[in-house]
Amino acid sequence: MSAQQSQQSSLGISTAIAKHKLLELIDTDRALIVVPFHFDWRAASLRVLLGASSTVALLLIVNGAYILAKGHPQQSRGITSVVEASLILLSMLSAAWVLTRESRLEAYELDKRLRAVAGEIREWTGTYADLRTPQLPTVTTYMTLRDGAWRDVPTLLLVKDDVIALGYGETAPCEVGLRTGELAGLVLTRGQTLAPELMRSRLCLECRLWDPLSAGHQAMAGRVLFLVLDTPLRNHLEQIARHHQRTDKSVLQNQICVVVRLCLLRILPIVAAIA
């Protein structure tokens, strides 16, 4: 009986170790999430629009300065040219400021949310809610051995070296390996379903490592013990980083693209034709 208790106590990790691993992962990977600038200033259409607008503003300034310097009787035209040039430059600076601020606010909001998650984990006292009675459809939990007891642990709170008990038909939360050692050969990837045929080829292995009854966990009879080989939160943070590296445009950016196309295809040709 003492040997069985010793083997049982050697399985799983403590809540304190899990908290440390989660906080270390958040602090490390949070700095790797970079929110790029929302608008691609290297786009050919945008460079044409900026170049045309800058040229028009420069010509208006030169024209206004010439009229004012010559003392032309109709100096109001010179003032009007300078004012129009100032409005063009002001609109360009305003658009650049709005886009820059939008990118900075998104990065700040993302960092603030990750800090809030880290704060919640730091304040976590190690209590686990019973989420399986009733089962919540919005929360995926796994029977996990923590502090020597089986707990309902959400996917994103699992860490490497956790021991989970999977039933047939359940999917793996991340990469998990059969508890027969690192070279066991049976590894389930994230989302892979545990099927009975996968275990039939493993019956020749020592059942005490993957069978809950042999490991002293009668409550988990009929399940299979797996060792968590990766932390699901890492994959979640990587997905966030990839999402923010995409070139999806916000509503403001789409409207600016519409204005750019309108100016290039409609307004500038009409102005050039009139001139």
Image: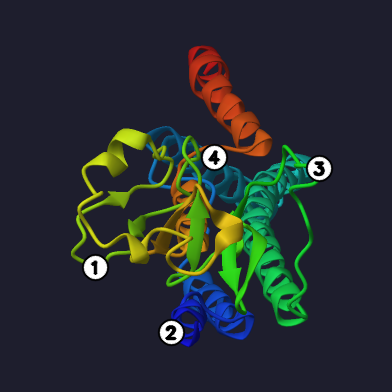
Image coloring type: rainbow
Q: Residue at the location (47% across, 76% down)?
A: 11
Q: Secondary structure at mark 1?
A: loop
From this view, report whether residue 30 is shown above or below residue 143. below
Answer whether residue 106 is visible to the viewer in this image. yes
Q: Which residue is mark 2?
A: 3
Of labels 3 and 2, the one closer to you: 2
C-alpha span from label 4 to label 2: 81 Å
Of labels 1 and 2, the one closer to you: 2
**Label 1 near label 4: C-beta < 8 Å?**
no
Q: Quadrant of residue 32?
A: bottom left
Q: Secondary structure at mark 4?
A: helix
The mark nearer the N terminus, 1 or 2, is 2
**Label 1 near label 3: C-beta < 8 Å?**
no
C-alpha span from label 1 to label 2: 23 Å
The mark nearer the N terminus, 3 or 1, is 3
Task: Say which mark, if any, is on residue 164.
Answer: none
C-alpha span from label 3 to label 1: 35 Å
Q: Which residue is mark 3?
A: 134
Callout 2 amino acid: Ala
Measured from the top left, where is residue 199 in percent x and y? 30, 43
**Label 4 near label 3: C-beta < 8 Å?**
no
**Label 2 near label 1: C-beta < 8 Å?**
no
Task: Say which mark, if any, is on residue 53.
Answer: 4
The mark nearer the N terminus, 4 or 1, is 4
Callout 4 amino acid: Ser
Callout 1 amino acid: Glu
Q: Which residue is mark 1?
A: 182
The mark nearer the N terminus, 3 or 4, is 4
C-alpha span from label 3 to label 2: 36 Å
Measured from the top left, where is residue 268 in percent x and y? 52, 22
The mark nearer the N terminus, 3 or 2, is 2
